[in-house]
Every structure is written in structure tokens, then in C-alpha cells.
Amino acid sequence: MTAMPPKLFLACATAVAAALFAAPAAQAQTWPERPLRLVVPFAAGGATDVLGRLLAVGLGEKLGQSVVVENKPGASTVIGATQVAKAAPDGYTLLLAASTTLTLNPAIRPHLGYDPIKSFTPLGLIADMSLVLVANPDTQIATLKDLVTQAKANPDKFSYGSFGAGSSVHFGAEMLKAATGIRMVHVPFNGSAPSLTALAGGQVPVAVDTVVATLPLIKGGKIRPVAVLSPQRLPALPQVPTVAESGYPGFQMGTWFALLAPAGLPAPVQQKLEKALADVANAPATKARMVELALTPAYGNGAAVKARVEKELPEMRAVAARADIRAE
């Protein structure tokens, strides 16, 4: 077999390399060429699902291709997140992630199917969902000071409800306990509905839940708002003070949402997605709909997602260790 002349070999090698580099670049220029899939790791019908569908419509308009929402609930978002982490990094599979996905699960689950930083390309922050401390209206708890006074007078006789062990509200309540120095027994339920039903029925005196879940019951007089765990008061509950205002400066805990793609996304595709998300999330109509859902618009770019995870993950690991929070 005759050896290829060095110059010809070099020319061929250069052509092959150029073709390999050109192919993804050319694909990125024409992307997207087919519908996209947005995995929402929550059940259909809730505020997160509505948010996902709102984003899907907006992104579809910006990108010129439909964005199909696919609900993949289960295991505190682990099922949906793992599926997206293992998908091809071609821009056609996206994830509406929650802080549960990125900072709580890694703090309490040692064997996840994804890494919160290495497995994804962050595209942007979207919205915050505030948490609320609520009480049974038959109790004498109208303020956080009331709860602290009564809990300290009756240590270990107070309990609080949450919608599940290892959830954002479980973390929020344990942070509240640490800040105020009170002791309460955690009573986890399988979802907001049973937790708040138990609260309204007097099975637990207090609970922590999302503003989305608690608002209808608060408006109906079934439960009483005591304090919000967000750094500012909420437009939906302007009369309810923050925990920080109630004597614990600097306190804040909530849940938030971000748009992610699998790691290794081509830079041109990433740039297109980041711009589309920025346009959609900052649109007045999108912001207004988020407020209607009791969400707080909180757009930030992909770098802001990474920075938030890197800041919060060590904090949540410390809370989990202190309170012995473990995955169910």
C-alpha cells in the first residue's frame, strides 16, 4: 500500500477537522428545525405547570418552533431532571428546574442521577415562589412573636405541617426554628392539600407552605397568615410581615425556578435560547401573568443561575446537616 504524501495527508486532515467543526456551527445557524420539548418535573395543573406552559408559548413565538410541555413528576423533580441531564445537548430538550432540583436534592440525596452544576447548561432564572408561615385560626398565634412565646413555654409540644420531608417548606421551617430558637416536631404530609387540610382541621397548629397553595385558604378564612419567609412583603399579602421584619433580620427562604438545557450545549444555540428567555421573561404580559399566579418575576441570565446554586447549595447542606433532613 502506497503511503500518502505528507502534504496531501495534512490537507486531508485539515479538511476533515474543518468539516467536523463546521457541522455543529452550521446546525446551530439553522436551529431550531423542529419542535422543542420542555420537561416540567411536576404534575399538570399546578402553578409550576402553568408557568411552564406560559414559557413554552412565549419561547415558541420567539424561536419559530412549537415548544411542547412534557410533565415528568416524581421523586422531588429527580425523575425529570435526570432525564434531561441524559438527553442530547442539541437544544431540543429543556428543563424547568426548581431550587429543589438544584440546591435541596443535592443537599440530602447522595446518589442523584445528575450534578446540579456539571450536568446542565443554565439558561436563566425565571421567578421566585414565596413561602408562608400559616396558623390554624383557632390558635392564639397571630404573629411570629406569639408562636415563639408559646413554643418556648411548651417545648416539644408544638408541631408543624409540611408537604413532604426534604421539601422547600421543610427546609424553611427548620431554618425558622434555628433562627428563633424554638423546638417543633415536623409532621410531613404527601402534598400541600393534605398538609393544609390538617392545619385547617386543627391536627397541627402551624404549617409552612407556598403562597400559591395557601392564598385561597387565607382568603377564605380557613387559615391565618403569620409571616412570609421572603425578603420583602408580597403583593398578594401586603398586610403580612416578613420574618425579617418580625425580629429576625436577614432571614429569607423561598423556592425559585430556572430554565436549563443538558450540559455541552453549542454556544450559538445557548445564546439563542438565553436571548429568547430574556425576551419572554421580561415581557410585561409574562410578568403580569406570573403575579396573577402569586409568583415574583425574577429574571437573571445563565450566569446568575450558576451563581445562585453555588451560593445556596452550601447553605442548604448546612441546614440539612443541622436539622438532620434526609430524603424520604
Image: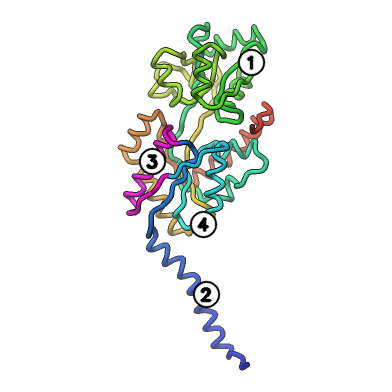
What is the secondary structure assignment of the residue under circle 4?
A: loop
Range of magenta residues = 44-69
C-alpha distance separating marks 1 and 4: 48 Å
C-alpha distance separating marks 1 and 3: 41 Å
Give amino acid for label 4.
Ala
- Labels 1, 3: front one: 3
Q: Position of residue 258 (x, y in %)?
A: 47, 41
Residue 11 falls left or right of residue 240: right
What is the secondary structure assignment of the residue under circle 2?
A: helix
Q: Is residue 245 visible?
A: no
Q: Earlier in the sequence, mark 4 or mark 2?
A: 2
Is 307 placed above or below 318 here? below
Q: Earlier in the sequence, mark 3 or mark 2?
A: 2
Image quadrant where residue 175 sits: top right
Give amino acid for label 1.
Ile
Q: Earlier in the sequence, mark 1 or mark 4?
A: 4
Q: Callout 4: 10 Å neighbours few (<14), some, many (20+)?
A: some
Residue at 42%, 65% (x, y): give it.
Answer: 27
Is 286 placed above or below 8 here? above
Whether label 4 touches label 2, CB < 8 Å: no
Residue at 47%, 45% (x, y): give it.
Answer: 39
What is the secondary structure assignment of the residue under circle 3?
A: helix
Q: Main secondary structure of the magenta part?
A: helix
C-alpha distance separating marks 4 and 3: 22 Å
Residue denoted by label 1: 182
